[in-house]
Image (cartoon, rainbow, N blue to C red):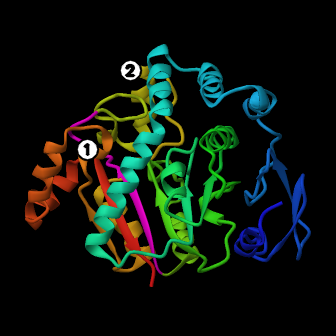
Amino acid sequence: MFPAHVEQVLRGPCCGVRMRYGESEIACVKCDQRYPVRLGIPDLRWPRPDRELPELAQRLIERYSDSSFAELVNFEIGSLSVTDRLKQVYQTYRFTAVERGAHLERMFWEHLSRHFQLPGRGAALSMGCGSGASLPAMSREFGTVYGVDPFLPDLILALKLCEEYGLENVVLIQAVGQNLPFASGVLDYASGQNVIEHLSDVEGVLHEVRRALRAMGCFCADSRNRFDLFLPEPHVRLRWVGFWPRRLMPGYVRVFRGVNYDGIRLLSLQELQRALRRSFDERWVLTLPNPSAYGHSARWDRILAKIRDYPVLRGLLLQFFPSHLVLAQAT
């Protein structure tokens, strides 16, 4: 099913040992736990979920062979129970994803080179890869790229995107970050674009990422700031969400946007620092990202470059800047 070098990297999340591979399922060689494979995407989530294949995933699978990436995206967005305004936001986000993903990866490596020795170019992880925003850019830089996400409908979109871009060195896996299906010390690089705010256990995921990285392997991510003073919350386009107590955030969003606020937990600067310290000790840096990577004028990049040279100003701005840039290295 997979090339030999991929099978050597993957491990069953149940027992952490190698697996037997088939066309429709994968099995742990130790406990014989079975994992289904759909459209070539193995479901390696652990603990195993009790629910059946979601209806949206089933309908995307049925349409897959006769649909383009754009058609699948439009079908997925049409199934959402959100306002037309938010549907338009999500549609624009999907169709500009590859360009945005390339900008973010360039920013990650630009800043990484300033603080750490750059990693090797063998195996890389796109953590929470979603519909594949980072995959084209990463596939040009690494021998093998693993796109991991717990949500099968997004992985189906990512599969179609890889097909249309002709990406032959990308392996898509349905898995959760708290139990990554990789052997220890096998990844050179891990990237998390717009994903930290969707993690239910940030420290658990960061610990797993560090475990899977080789010595001197690097992790880069951006993290939307809970206490952003400058821009609306990106998922619901509403200001001041993060300034409410967490238990009141869902009600605030429902009143002003009429949608649920599930699966989103923006972190403050202090919360993010604490999670990194517990996972990477002192081998990490939090800094200001490049606004141009998010579609803003490069003039702001030059302004922030000057602010970064002044620790007091940098620290104050980090408290309230829209996003934080995370750079870390395994030892």
Q: Residue furthest top?
A: 84
Q: Describe residue 134's horizontal placement relative to residue 162 as left or right.
A: left
Judge whether 297 appears above or below 21 on screen.
Answer: above
Q: Nearer the viewer, residue 56 or 271?
A: 56
> Is residue 225 rendered magenta in the image?
yes
**Res 164 quadrant in image:** top right
Looking at the rendered structure, the secondary structure element under dot 2 is helix
Q: Identify which residue, 210 or 275, lies in the foreground.
A: 210
Work out whether residue 227 can be spotted: no
Q: How many other residues sit within 10 Å of disc 1, few (<14), some (14-19) or many (≥20)?
A: some
Residue 81 placed where, x, y %? 59, 20
Place of residue 60 in the rendered image (x, y in percent of width and height, measured from the top left): 74, 30
Q: Residue at x 46, y 20 (%)?
A: 88
Mark 1 falls on what kind of element? helix
Residue 310 pos. (x, y %): 7, 65
Q: Pinpoint residue 292: horizontal percent, then vertical percent.
A: 26, 44
Tell me the residue that label 2 is attached to: 256
